[in-house]
Image (cartoon, coloured by chain):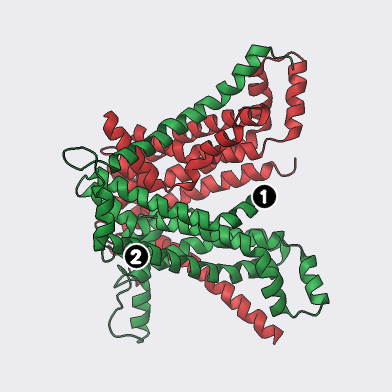
Amino acid sequence: MRAAVRFAAWLYAVAVYGFIFLPVVVLVLFSLQATSFPIPPFTGPSLRWYQAVLSDARLTSALVNSLLVAVLSSLASVTLGFLSAWGFARFVLPGSALLRGLITLPLTVSYLIIGMGLLVLFNWAGVPKSLLAAGIGHVVINLPLCFAIIYSQMGDHQINIERAARDLGAAEWKVLLLITVPVMAPAIFAGFFLSMTFSWDEFVISFLLTRFETTLPVEIWNLLRSGLNPKTNAVGSLVFAVSIVLVVFFELTLLRRKPA
Amino acid sequence: MSVSGSNSRALPWALVTPALAWTLLFFVLPFIAMGFSSLTAHEGGGFTLANYSQFFTDPSYWRSMVNSLEVTAIVTVISILLAYPFAWILAEMVPQRWQRLALMLAVLPFWTSYVVRSYSWLLVLAQNGVINRALTGMGLIAEPLQLANTRFATVTGFVHFFVMLLTLTIFANLKQLSPSYRRAAADLGAGPVRTFLHVVLPLTLPGIMVGAFLTFVLCIGDYITPQILGGNNELVMPQLVMMQIGRRGDFPLASALSIILMAVVTIAYLACARWLKIERA
């Protein structure tokens, strides 16, 4: 009886793993398809669709745009998030609980509505659709994340180091740059890489706020109109690879703090 | 502190103001703009409640809200039912040293591009996709099944995403549970089933509710999965919103629909507030 339950449990786990991995395995497998349709039977293996993606000017420029927006918006998010987290953790401010709530509020609103709001506002203000507009939206969604991660890692032992530095005559900006930033580096990097993965993958805001120059998820969306296509599989597999690299960095930075 | 009085008062504000200003300018202000916009007419301007009354009187608009709520409810229930036993197996049956790896594997596809993940379900579910090829190949069906462009496809795509999310939250919840509760229940004579129903399940309920709330919010606000997998047969709210912008450039109506969508999420939050607060404490 017990053995039967155990067997059923393992079977169940394998089935769920199968469900979770099925689409990803199919995606990667058929990106290596030699013929023109990403459907069974597998005729593979061939790298021709990767070659096609890398020689497609629209896709490669969208890829560069995506990386650019991801890096710059994440830098802005992590800078604003770090400064405000430090401010809230080290000083008593009137209404600080409310203000902290305000900063984290965008986390509870769907990306579609954030994008819609910016679209209406920019439309009224006469701001044209652009990568910059989309990047502003990415900071709106990633700033609360960076703030929350860094704020939660501001511990008491750091206060003492900062106080020691001040007692030894360091100016406030020196304390910030030479003490707090290095001590908080793991949380700062974690916030940065997590923002990168979200910005890199973000679709709706970029879709609403860009027009001529756009990001990779939007370009992939446009590719989807042509139906099932091994080129889409190849670019999708590449996007997956980049995300995994970013997640590994996120894991490493967050894990590095643990022994401390 | 060796900081001078006036400096120490100005400094904290200098630190927090940029983040606050960003949030006010690019989150709160757009929301206000959207509120105003929702009260204007598409052509000609002037204040009107027409956009809201259109939603409440036009049955096709109602229908999309009902679709949204139905899909979200189905997805939430199935995802919890699938994820709970899975998280349990990972937490209880997988040896300690392999748990981290097992969990990382379970959420690895989480990090594929969201658009691409929905598309890859299309490869599985399409007329000539993997499932139909396999079934016809085995001689189980003569004609390929219509799997893509249905509610079934939308639900599958969503469940795929949320099983990973809920496995994470429920796993964390189960790991926090002290084993002494279960030991105490066993000592008092409860069998495994009773221990689960009367001890483990109630203690993990707050975690389940938080996960369910997250699923609700992310699912009802999502445009990508229903658009790619569900097609245009039965629209959900986000599709309706995007349609107003894409086809007709009707910002006021799209704004009104967004605000209604947000109101529904707020109601869900208030309904779950009890559990969400427990989690925060």
Q: Which mark is residue A204?
A: none
Where on the picture, by quarter, is residue A61?
top left
> Which quarter of the image is occupied by the N terminus of chain A?
bottom right
For disc 1, the marked residue is B281
Q: Colour of chain A?
A: red
Tell me which amino acid carries mark 1: Ala
Name the one closer to the observer, A234 or B53. B53
Looking at the picture, does residue A83 appear above or below residue A167? below
Coordinates of residue A88 in the picture (x, y in percent): 62, 30
Tell me which amino acid carries mark 2: Asn
Horizontally, is A182 left or right of A243 in the view? right
Coordinates of residue A122 in the picture (x, y in percent): 31, 33
For disc 2, the marked residue is B67
Question: Residue drawn at (59%, 17%), measured in percent from left and top?
Answer: B10
Question: Residue drawn at (45%, 36%), measured in percent from left and top?
Answer: A139
* Secondary structure of residue under mark 2: helix
